[in-house]
Structures are given as structure tokens and as C-alpha cells.
Amino acid sequence: MNALVPLLVTLPLLGAGIALIFGRRRRVQVGVSIVTLTVAAAIAAVLLYYVDLSGAPLAVSVGGWPIPFGIVLYVDRLAALLVLVSSIVLLAVLLFSVGQGAADGDEETPVSIFHPSYLILAAGIFNAFIAGDLFNLYVGFEILLVASYVLITLGSTESRIRTGVVYIVVSLVSSILFLAAIAAIYGALGTVNMAQLADRMGELPDEVQLVLHLMLLLAFSIKAAVFPLSFWLPDSYPTAPAPVTAVFAGLLTKVGVYAMIRTETQIFRDNDVNQLLLIVALATMVVGILGAVAQAELKRILSFTLVSHIGYMVFGLAIATPASLGATIYYMVHHIVVQTTLFLAVGLVERRAGSTSILKVKGLMRAAPLLAVLYFIPAINLGGLPPFSGFIGKYALFDAAAAVGTPIMYALIVAGIVTSLLTLYALMRAWNLSFWREEEDHAEESGVVDRISYLDDAPAAGVQTERRVIPRIMTASTTGMVAVTIALTVFAGPLYHLCASIGAALPYPVSLTQLQDEVNDGN
């Protein structure tokens, strides 16, 4: 079983190489990408089943080097679950992009560049999730960031280059901080293996631990778009092609959240900065959703809601109980799927209406009723209406906070409820204006426009492009993702049980001896 673990990284890299070789053959590249991500999803499902059934993680020392000197790939329930969810999302977005490329040609997503970069992005994401040491985690971040630099500037339009430069600069600052923290940790403790760091970190003075802790936390907070380090995201994501925006919104920030979860629960479990995290979570939720309410463009609305809902995950991490960690994992899975689905639905709206401005789009309920459903279901799910997974995840977080019962916990519960209601307001306002507002009803429309005139100066409110045909595969992939969002609710019991078991295990990380035993058992 251990032999399957390295395939999660090597298969996408091999697929990227093959796709690059066949750069002038669209069908070959598409076939290679689909097969690669399908096989990766199957491997992740097998690994998740095995580690959940056995209760023991899998560990592989790459190249046969003894631990802790070699690169260790580590798969427990958390890593396997996130790789599985990520591979499903990557496959769905890939199918969406294939439909867009077939309809529009290479203007939006040049196929010879897109497929190799996309598979390298997948390799970086998977590597980050299964990294057993900080430096390999850094390598995973850099692999996915290099690929994302290419993807975010596809098409080479002025707006994409401009926002891409901001994205690249911010990412490089985060990477420099991360690398400096790794160097400082290695200089202080002589290792970057996370299992060994968990054993040795207590040897350092508390002040040194705190400095190292805050350095890593700052680097990961930039990647996760935690307020006030989230300023770059709302301007960067909306300008990219629809499939790129969808996969970025669903996955890239969650890699940062995952890194925070790993380091907080494993390396720095005795160094408490939870009060700081609670304050940051409160600010992230509130500021993010107030930004969403002030937007008139659907992609920017979703980008700000993305920031605000990162606050829920930081909230659950800061509560720091097994119940809250389980709820955080469940909410992370929910948000990866639902946020990606919403961006795909907005991509369909843009093609059908020629705009994503809620001041411009109208009458879609009559013109495209299926599209209305594809937007509505994930929107109310993200807003937290029962019985959907968004409600389940938020209720679990609030319940864990109430069990602690401190005043700041109750303040976070109130902020979480307000954020959820404002999320629902922002998304349903867009639904009302874009889908229910009829083009012929000028008298009623004038009253509506008067009530939302404060949005006239919002960024990108007046952008208009040509209307385009929606290929069936784009609709099918979005429909499939909507089905997955519903499955998160239908199968909430088994999924939440799995997440609860992950949360219960996280405060008790594997030791170096146990890690060595796992590697030896695999050999």
C-alpha cells in the first residue's frame, strides 16, 4: 500500500511532461490530464479507505534515506481526505475547461500551456498535503505557486498581467517568510521533520518558540488570505479565466489553512496563540463579508465571501478542541466543494449573459432555468441554510465554541451568525437581480436600481463582454459539482464521523519512533 503514496506526486508530474511533449495535440493532452486526475482520485480513495480502516497512517521515506534525513511522505486520514476531495475538484474543473477550450479555442486557456501547468499545480497541492517535513511542504507550495503564476496570467490581457504581478509579489513574500522560518527552525533544532520537531520543540525557550511560531503563522496566513493579509485576493482571482478562478478559490487558500492546522496541532501544540487567532478569525469573517456586500460583480462577491469563510476555519482551529478540529475539517471539505461550484456557475452566467455584474445581468430565470438551479443550490449552502452542509459545519463550530463558553467564544458565535446571514444576503441579492429581474419590467426595474445605486461605483460593475454558447460539458461538470455539494449533506453522517475521528487524532501527533516504525513496516 505504501507504494501508492509517491504516485500522488509522480503521476501528475509525469502527466505534465507527456502533455508538454504533445503540446500541439489537444485531444492527447486532454486525455492525459483526465486519466491522470482520475487515477489520482482512485489512489486517494484507496488510501483513505485503508488508513481509516486500519487506523494507522502510511509513511514512505523517498529514496530509502533513513528518517529524519530523507524526504518523508505521510498519509493519514486528513491528508488522504483532502487529496481525494482536491482530485475530484481538479477533475471537474478540468472538464469545465475542456468545454470552454473546445468552444472558444486557445484564447482563454491556451491548451499547450494550460494542461501541463494544471497538472503541475495538482502535483504541488498533493505534495503539500502529504509532506512529512517542513521543507517538503515548502517545495509543495512552490510547485503549486509556479504553476499558478502561469495559470493566473493566461491570455496575457492587461488586467491579468497587472493582477498577476501583485499575486506573484505577495506569494514571493510569503515564500521568503516561510523559507526563513524553516532556516531558523533548522538552525535551532537541527531538523525540519515534523514528527521530530514535535519531540524537540519543547527544548527551546518559550520566547524562541513564539518567534518561530509567529513566522510560520504569518507565512501561512498570507497564503490562506487571512485578514489583514487578504488584500491581494479579491483583485487577483476575478481576472483569471473561469476554470482557473474556480480551482484557485476552492483549493489554494485551503492549502494554507491545512499548513496552519498541521503546525498548530503538531509542532506548536504547547505554544498557545489561540487568543490572537480568535481575534484574527473575527476580523476575517466580518471584514470579508462587509466587502462582499459592497460589490456589484459576482466574482468579486464570491472572492470576498471566500475571505470571510476562511475566518470560520481559523475560528475552529483557535478553539483547539477535538470537536472544533473535526468541525473545521468538515467545513474545509464543504467550502472547497461549494466555493468551486459557485465559481463554475458564475462562469456559466458570464457566458450566457455576457457579464457578471448584477447591475447588468437580468432575466436569467426565464432564459436559463437550469443555470438558476446550479447557482441557487450552492449559494444557499454557502449561506448556511439547513439542512445543507454549510449549516452542519457552522453549527458544529458554534457548538464547539459554546462548550468552551468564554466571552470571546460567544462573540465569535455572534459574528459567525451575522457573517452567515450577510453571506446569504449578498448571494441572494445577486440571485434576485440576475435571475428574477425581467428585462421588460422597466418601471419595477427603475425602483430596484434606485435601491442599489450605491453599487454604481463598485469595481467592474460596468464590464460587458459578448454572449457565448455554453457547451454541454461545461454544464455537465457544474451539475456534477452541484451533485457533490448535495452529497456532502446526504452523507453528512459518515463524513462528519470521519472528520471527528481526524479531529480527535490531531492533538496526538505521531512520534518520530512511530514514524520510523511505519516506514519500516512499509518496507
Image (cartoon, rainbow, N blue to C red):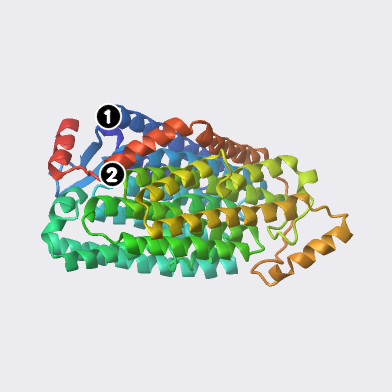
Q: CA distance from mark 1 to mark 2?
A: 23 Å
The residue at the far bottom in this view is: 457
* Residue 122 spot, x, y in % from top left: 42, 46
Residue identified by numbered label 1: 1
Q: Is residue 13 above or below residue 489?
A: below
Residue identified by numbered label 2: 506
Q: Is residue 395 above or below residue 484?
A: below
Residue 58 is left or right of residue 384, and the answer is left
Q: Which residue is at 18% across, 35% downward?
A: 518
Q: Nearer the viewer, residue 216 or 507?
A: 507
Q: Nearer the viewer, residue 64 or 453?
A: 453
Mark 2 neighbour density, 10 Å: few (under 14) some (14–19) many (20 or more): many
Quarter-wise, where is residue 264 in the image?
A: bottom left
Find numbered disc 1 in the image and state the secondary structure of the residue it sits on. Answer: loop
Question: In the image, which is nearer the foreground, mark 1 or mark 2?
Answer: 2
The kind of residue tagged 1 is Met
Mark 1 neighbour density, 10 Å: few (under 14) some (14–19) many (20 or more): few
For the N terminus, the quadrant is top left
* Residue 32 spot, x, y in % from top left: 47, 38
Q: Which residue is at 15% across, 39% downward?
A: 514
* Residue 450 spot, x, y in % from top left: 79, 67
The kind of residue tagged 2 is Leu
Residue 368 is left or right of residue 286, and the answer is right
Query: Do we see residue 94 in this rendering?
Result: no
Q: Nearer the viewer, residue 408 or 276?
A: 408
* Residue 265 spot, x, y in % from top left: 27, 50
Lower position in the chain sequence, tag 1 or tag 2: 1
Q: Nearer the viewer, residue 253 or 506?
A: 506
